[in-house]
Image (cartoon, rainbow, N blue to C red):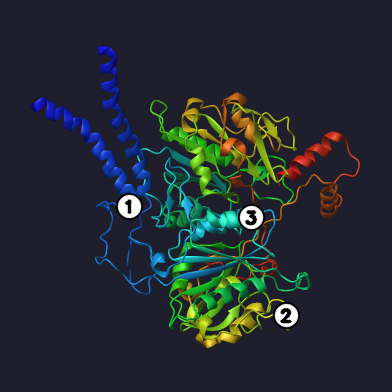
Amino acid sequence: MKSLLLSRFLLLLPWGLIVILLLDTDSSRAPPAPPARPPQQAGPRRPALPPIYAITPTYSRPVQKAELTRLANTFRQVARLHWVLVEDAARRSELVSRFVARAGLPCTHLHVPTPRRYKRPGLPRATEQRNAGLAWLRQRHQHLPPPQPGVLFFADDDNTYSLELFEEMRTTRKVSVWPVGLVGGRRYERPVVENGKVVGWYTGWRADRPFAIDMAGFAVSLQVILSNPKAVFKRRGSQPGMQESDFLNQITTVEELEPKANNCTKVLVWHTRTEKKRPLLSKAGFAHLQSLLPGVWPVRRKQGKNRVLLNTVFYH
Amino acid sequence: MLRRRNLLTTLLIILPWALLLTLWHQYPATRYLILLRKETDENATAKAHFNGTSPLREEGLPSCSWQQASGVAQKVIQNYVYSRPPPWSDTLPTIFVITPTYTRPVQKAELTRLANTFLHVQNLHWVVVEDSPRRTNLVSNLLEKAGLNFTHLNVESPQSLKMGGSWIPSHKPRGTLQRNLGLHWLRDSFNNTRPPEGVVYFADDDNTYSLELFEEMRYTRRVSVWPVAFAGGLRYESPIVSPAGKVVGWKVVFDPNRPFAIDMAGFAVSIRLILERPQATFKLEGVKGGYQESSLLKDLVTMDGLEPKAAHCTKVLVWHTRTERPMLGNEGKQGFSDLRMEV
C-alpha cells in the first residue's frame, strides 16, 4: 500500500513541477532577487522617473538600418525612453515599420516628407521631421494638466550617445546644455560655465550665434514645449547653422540654461558621421577615385599592379 | 507483451523528467529580464532601473513587442527591464569578442556605442586589444565604467603596419597583431583538456552588430558564417548555401577565388577549435588585403565544415559601417581645444 502511494507520488511529482514552472513563467512574476545584490529600497511604488523623449529624424539610405539598430541598442539601455522616429518620406517605409515592430523599446513611427525645394545643400535638414515630433508631443499632452514631467531631445541617427548622458538630461527643469564631441571643426564644442551659469560658448564655428550649440547639445523639458506651443524650427528666414539658436530663442534665454555634465567639462555625446556606402566597382566609382588620387591612380599600368591597388582600395 | 508494457511504463516515467529538464534550462534565460532599482542622491547621476510592472502600461502607451531571439518559446515580452549586463549564466556558452582598436578622435565614441550593444548580450567577454605601446587611460576607464566582463591588452604594431597610419592604406592587413594577441591570450587562459563552451568573434570597433547575431553564433560547433552588409563593395556579401544546408561558394564580386571570401565580421570560431589548433593565427607575411580571414580559416576548417547561420545566410545581422574622419580643421597645427577634456 505504502509503496503504491510512493510510486504514485513519484509519478506525479515531475508533472506537478512542470505545471508550477509554466505558471510561473506565464505570469512573468519577478523571481526573488539574489542576496548578492545591494539592498533595495523598500516600498512597492516609487515615484516614476521622468520620461525621456528622443526625436529622431531619419531618411532612407543604405546605412539607415544599421544606424537605427545601433541607436536602438543604446536607447534600450535607458529606462523610460520613448523613441519618436520621424521618416523623411511620403509614407511609412516597410523597413522602418518592420524595424519599429521589433525594436524592443516604446516608439512612435511618424513620417513627413521634406518639400523638394528645401532639399538643396546648405539648407537646414530635418526641420519638418523635428517639427512633426514636436507636434505629436503637443497633441498627445494637450488635455493633460501641467506640469507634465518629461524631457525631450533631438537625437540624430548617426550620433553616438553614452548612457550617462540620459541620466544627466533627466533632471532638466527648463533647458539644459552640455558639450558635444567632434563638432564645430574641433575636438569638442561646449558652453562656457561660470558659477554654475552659462556665460559664453566655446566653439570653432560662428561663436557669435546666440546659442552656439549643436542639435545634440541640449534637451528641453516637456512642460516648456507645451507652454510654448508656437515654438518650432523655422524655415523662413533661417540661415544655415542657426536652427538651434532660432529655436532656443523662442523658449529660453542664455541665463536660464542649466549646464550639465559636470559644469560642461565632460563629453557624453559625439557628433559621429557614417561614411556613405557606394559600391566601388562601377565606372563612376573608379572615375571618382581617380579624381581623389591624382597622380597616384595609374593611368596605364600592368594588370597586376592595378589589381593590387584595387585590393588596397577595398580595404580602406 | 509484458516487455512492451515495461517499456511503455519506463518511457512514461522518463518523459516528464526530460520535459522538466528542458523547461528548467529555459527558465534562467528569462530570468535576466529583471531590473533592480537603485536609488542614489538627487543630484548624482542616477542609474535608473525598474521593478515590477512597467509604468508604460499606466500611461497607456503602446510598447513595441520584442521577440526573444534565442528562446525556444517565442514570448512577446512587454516589460523591458535590463540589468547591465545580464547576469552570468553557467549554462550558456560564452562569446569572446576580440576587438582591435587604435587611438584616433572617434575611438571613444566607437567603443562607447559598441559597449552599449554588448551590454545586452549575456555571457559576453570583451577582449579589447589596443594598438599602442601602453594601455591608455581612455580605454581603461571606459572598460571599467561600462560594467562588462573584459580583458584589456595591448601590442604596438610596427610603423609599416600601424592602424590608421597613412590615409592611403598600405595593402598590408591591419589589426593582425592585435587579433593574434587576443587569440594568444585565449590559448593561455584556457586549458585544452577542459575547454570552455564558447565561441570567438572578431568585432571591429566601427561595425554595427544586431543583438540577434550573438545568439546565432553562440552555439557554433566549429566555424559558423553569415552575410555581412557593405563588405566587398556590395550591399552585402554572403556565403552560398546549398539546399542541404552546406556552404558551397561565395556570393561576392571582389576576388571570389579566395579560399574563404568572407569579411572579418562574417564568421565565428568555437573556442574548442581554437585551442585544438594552436598554430592557427592570422598571417602577416605574404598576405594581401582580403586574404587575412582566409589565412586563419584555412588552418581551422574546410569549406564543408562551415555552419551557415542567419536563416541559411538569408538575413543580414551585421553591417560593415565605417565612421567618417571628423573635420578638425579648427584645431590648427598646435591644437586648440583643451586636451584635458577627454573626447
> In the displayed structure, would residue B195 be above or below residue B326?
above
Q: Amino acid at mark 1?
A: Ser
Chain for mark 1? A
Between B291 and A84, the one nearer to me in the picture: A84
Q: Residues within 10 Å of mark 2 (few under 14, many from 20)?
A: few
Q: Which residue is mark 2?
A: A239
Q: Which residue is mark 1?
A: A27
Q: Quadrant of the N terminus of chain B?
A: top left
All told, the count of numbered labels is 3
Residue farthest toward the front in the current orientation of the protein: B1
Between A75 and A288, the one nearer to me in the picture: A75
Q: Which residue is mark 3?
A: A94
Counting from the top left corner in percent of width and height, residue B314 is at 62, 39
Counting from the top left corner in percent of width and height, residue A50 is at 42, 72
Q: Is residue A189 visible?
A: no
Is A69 displayed left or right of B13 in the figure?
A: right
> In the displayed structure, would residue A257 be above or below residue B167?
below
Q: Amino acid at mark 3?
A: Glu
Kindly state the secondary structure of the residue where label 1 is placed: loop
Q: Mark 1–mark 3 contact, CB under 8 Å? A: no
Q: Which mark is residue B235?
A: none
Q: Tag 3 or tag 2, which sits nearer the N-term? A: 3
Residue farthest toward the right in the current orientation of the protein: A300
The residue lying at 83 percent from left, 37 percent from top is A305
Is B220 displayed left or right of B17 in the figure?
A: right
